[in-house]
Amino acid sequence: MEVITSIRPVLAIIVSLIAACLILITGERSRNLRELWTILASVAKFIIVASMIPFVLQGKVIEYTVISLAPGLLLQFRVDAFGLLFGILASTLWIATSLYSIGYMRGLNEHAQTRYFFCFAIALSATMGIAFAANLLTLFIFYEILTMATYPLVAHKETPDAIKGGRKYLAYTLTAGVVILLASAIIYSLTGTLDFKPGGYLAGHASADMLRFLFVALIMGFGVKAAIMPLHEWLPTAMVAPAPVSALLHAVAVVKAGVFGVLRVILYVFGPNLLHDMGLWLILAYFVSFSVIVSCFFALAQDNLKRRLAFSTINNLAIIILGAALLSTSAIKGGMLHMAYHGFMKITLFFVAGAIYVKTHKEDVSELDGLGRQMPLTLGSFAIGAMGVAGIPPVCGFISKWYLCLGSLEAKEIVFLFVFLTSALLDAAFFFPIVYSSFFKKPKGDVNPHFDEASMFMVIPLMATAIASLILGIFPNAFVHFFEIATLAVRSVLGS
């Protein structure tokens, strides 16, 4: 595998840091200019990330070392296929979220908008650092930066509930960070390196008991942001945040960073062979299967739309980890694809929840009867996202879930095929009644009988992500080669 030295991954990180400074300098004096920096930075970030796609498709890896702290301990960035998959997802959806944020924040005349856009930009820089981290140390640094940058976003409303939600978020994620740091220090003392290696590198470096401890520590550490039950409680509480922040948490940055970290541990630190030989894959598979099923029942019980979406996210994150834990070719590919495709579908659903709130101030599922007649574009986009999350063609969720089911058959584990199918049925159970009631039930309260959508700054992004979910379901390689990049990542890990 050819290694190319390039500053591009650093530029992808820096561009939104520059925007954050410009946003802070501009402030409230010129809202249009302040938000222009956000849009320009999001587009520039996407262009930089997209420019690396041809190199990775050719089987090359892009590296850039910032500083060597000690032998084998580097602050280094490496763009491999899996990291690029996450980087493309985040940079693409940041454009949509930036446009949506303008409509949302102005539509509600929110306070502290400069702080909001500033923290948003820092969070996306941290996300890029996580995506392109070459080792556990670099990933940890940007993982913690992401935590600190998103805390003001979670607590943005500054109400008692928002402050409580922010503190709980910090308590969970900072504690998890300490666990990750401890495990990383032990791994460095054992191996002399923290670099990610396709297929892992820990075999033969420690006793079985120490390897089990390290695996549990790292899965628990990254599993907090991935909202693996019972480490999930911060996530529903964080739904007090504005809708664009919820979209950031669920589709673009925070929880996807957690899942990304878990998959790095499974595939690039321990590796499939070691996990299979020790039987750790099966323990993890059953553990996350609990999250898959139980989170669906929690979602069914939620009347608040964003909380229902939050438990749906927990369900889908667990599906991604379960796919990686099965260690078969199709299951790993399905997990990686679902990480990307779920981002488009779930951000659509949260965009819809925010648009409904801005236009009608309704937050509960029981209040949505007949609303599809007033907001057909918005609720129609919700229907597309719901179909995708339930794995119904032609939306892209069908493709990733197909590979997950196929992977369970490859692994000869029928019980996990049952888990995937049950999850899809329950997804339909808690989303389709919303679609039905919004379009086919009579409204209980005052609903405008004429078309009355939210601002186009909100409607266009949510329609764009819904349409992209459809296109990716028909042409899985459309736009940015998600399918091909995931295939390359799986081949590098499994060596086939």
Image (cartoon, helix red, strand yellow):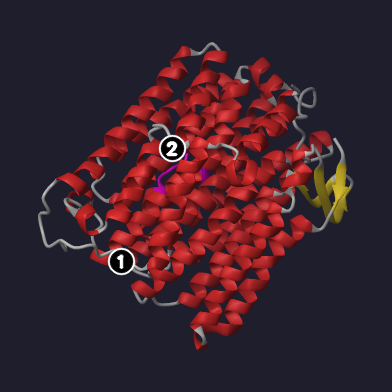
Q: Which residues are drawn in magenta?
A: 224-235
Where is residue 145? Give x, y as percent.
Answer: 62, 59
In the picture as drawn, the residue positioned furthest to the bottom comes out as 29
Identified at 27% across, 33% down, the residue is 429
Q: Provide the major secondary structure of the magenta segment.
A: loop
Disc 1 or 2, which lies upstream in sequence? 1
Where is residue 285? Give x, y as percent.
Answer: 52, 24
Residue type, numbered disc 1: Val
Whether residue 410 sits left or right of residue 316 in the image: it is right
Q: Quadrant of the C terminus?
A: top right
| Label ID, residue 358 | 1
Identified at 53% across, 75% down, the residue is 35
Identified at 17% across, 50% down, the residue is 369
Where is residue 122? Give x, y as percent.
Answer: 60, 65
Which residue lies under the disc numbered 2?
395
Residue 376: quarter of image: bottom left
Q: Residues within 10 Å of mark 1 (few under 14, many from 20)?
A: many
In the picture as drawn, the residue positioned furthest to the right comes out as 71
Residue type, numbered disc 2: Val
Q: Is residue 414 magenta?
A: no
3D distance between C-alphas at marks 1 and 2: 27 Å
State the residue in front, 170 or 78. 78
